[in-house]
Amino acid sequence: MFRAKVLIKRRASILDPQGKAVEIGAQHLGLTNIKNTRIGKYIEFDVDTNDKTEAEKEVNDYCEKLLANPVMEDYEITLEEVKWANLNSE
Amino acid sequence: MFRAKVLIKRRASILDPQGKAVEIGAQHLGLTNIKNTRIGKYIEFDVDTNDKTEAEKEVNDYCEKLLANPVMEDYEITLEEVKWANLNSE
């Protein structure tokens, strides 16, 4: 089994209105040194196979087709093998 | 100046309906090995001060008061010093 961690960020050239809005809140709270806030996503999941090639393919498809918007966002994948796990525990 | 990176995750005991919904999409696309998807946030920002103690305090306040929900979420902060930077470049 593999454990995947995916970071998704907007491209630097694309504005981030959500980050801007939160940052205005920070200014109001007196946190005046906070600049350039950008909000992305962090996604964790398991890939229930022992074939690394298959796992990589599923992770890439998942990112391209569902998790990220390839037009506006870049993503970084970390895939690590897990030797044993109980998939039903949360 | 410091550069902060913050990962925000829901506590393991708290359900993640957004992750569940995306995962159902994955099953429909034939990505049947994907399990336990959990969606969190990844936030990057600059802290425009050279005083590390002050930077840490601002980052903690920002996380506690605006970025994370301390009741449902845990967060991890990485703070690294940046020796020079142009704050106006995006």
Image (spheres, coloured by chain):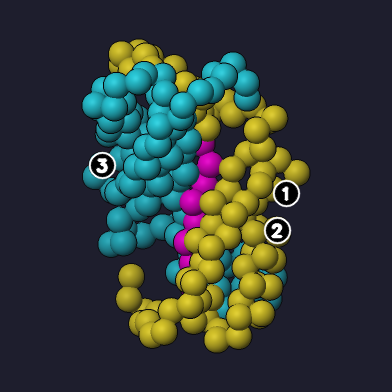
Chain colours: A cyan, B yellow
Answer yes or no: do the residues labelled 1 and 2 have beta carbons within 8 Å?
A: yes
Residue B46 percent across, percent down from the top left: 49, 72
Q: Is residue A55 visible?
A: yes
Amino acid type of disc 1? Pro
Specify the principal SS of the magenta part.
Answer: strand
Which image quarter is the N terminus of chain A in? top left
Which numbered dot is residue A70?
Answer: 3
| Residue on which the image places disc 2 | B64
Q: Give residue B85's quadrant in the image.
A: bottom left
Q: Chain of mark 1?
A: B
Which image quarter is the C terminus of chain A in? top right
Q: Is B19 on the left-hand or right-hand side of B54?
A: left
Helix, strand or loop at label 2? It is: helix
Q: Distance of mark 3 from mark 2, alpha carbons?
A: 31 Å
| Residue on which the image places disc 1 | B70
Taking the spot 41% from the left edge, 19% from the top edge, the residue there is A48
Residue B10 percent across, percent down from the top left: 63, 39
Amino acid type of disc 3? Pro
Q: Distance of mark 1 from mark 2, alpha carbons?
A: 6 Å
Residue A5 percent across, percent down from the top left: 43, 40
Of the two numbered discs 1 and 2 on the same chain, state the one appearing first in sequence: 2
Check chain identity for marks 1 and 2: say if they share one. Answer: yes
Taking the spot 36% from the left edge, 82% from the top edge, the residue there is B86
The magenta region covers B39-46
Helix, strand or loop at label 3? It is: loop
Q: Distance of mark 3 from mark 1, alpha carbons?
A: 31 Å
